[in-house]
Image: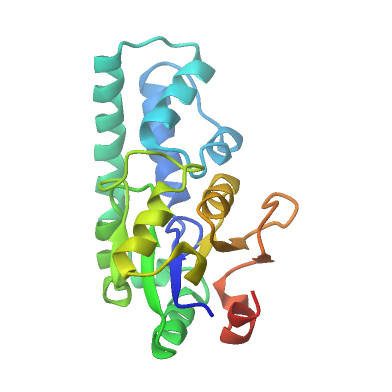
Amino acid sequence: MVKACIFDLDGVIVDTAVYHFKAWKRLANHLGFDFTEAENEKLKGVSRVRSLQLILEWGGVKKTTDEQSQLADLKNSWYVEMIQGMQPDEILPGAKEFLLTVRNAGLKTALGSASKNSRTILEKVGLIELFDSIIDGNTVTASKPDPEVFLKGAQSLGFNPADCVVFEDAIAGVEAALAGGMKVVGIGDSATLIGANLVVAGLHEMNLDKLYKL
């Protein structure tokens, strides 16, 4: 029986991809090259440090470790500036409703995200009270597909991984959940999210019946 739900943030609860894209594009332009939306798609579920490394590779730019750290901080400062204006209407369709449904059913909820700004985002959109635990980039060291973020989420709620269902929109996240011994609901395209136990377009398509049948 499902006892807890662990949610990724970007692409599942809210879509901050546009803000990441604008901040990364600004950084690429600052370094003298462009950054496309297609390249941005390849960064789904990837850590900030690794994202920067990929962007530098695509731009043919070499930087020292210290310089990379400074650039990552610069990008993040622009991103944090942008998300300060986020509003509740930026919650993805059905996300708040499904969170309320599972909590009213007595299930625990956790966030399992690579974002270091997840708490700020949840506060801005008014959802932070709907999570029993927040595990994010501030508390994990390994990036998905390593299952660390989800294993810590399960542990923080006091449940075994097998008692938890993960909701993810990136293949790296699906792989992480499966590696952690959890059921996973993919949010997006079934052709991409290979291995997910169920794939839906968004949380607006989820209900308790589907959850308990996993």
Left or right of 157: which side holds 197? right
Percent of width and height locating residue 37: 56, 38
How many numbered discs? 0
Percent of width and height locating residue 175: 58, 48
Where 63 sits versus 120, above or below?
Answer: above
Tell me which residue sits at (34%, 62%) in the image: 155
Q: Residue furthest bottom?
A: 104
Left or right of 126: which side holds 113? right
Asked which colour scheme the image uses, the reply is: rainbow
Percent of width and height locating residue 39: 57, 33
Q: In the picture, which quadrant includes the N terminus?
A: bottom right
Q: In the picture, which quadrant includes the C terminus?
A: bottom right
Name the foreground residue: 205 vs 22.
205
Q: Is residue 113 visible?
A: no
Q: Residue furthest right?
A: 191
Where 82 sits versus 55, above or below?
Answer: below
Tell me which residue sits at (61%, 61%) in the image: 186
Where 168 sits versus 176, above or below?
Answer: below
Where 34 sits versus 178, above or below?
Answer: above
Q: Quadrant of residue 106?
A: bottom left
Q: Is residue 16 visible?
A: yes
Name the foreground residue: 190 vs 29.
190
Percent of width and height locating residue 78: 28, 39
Q: Quadrant of residue 23?
A: top left
Q: Quadrant of residue 72?
A: top left
Tell me which residue sits at (58%, 62%) in the image: 184
Tell me which residue sits at (31%, 11%) in the image: 64
Left or right of 177: which side holds 27? left
Name the foreground residue: 66 vs 174.
174
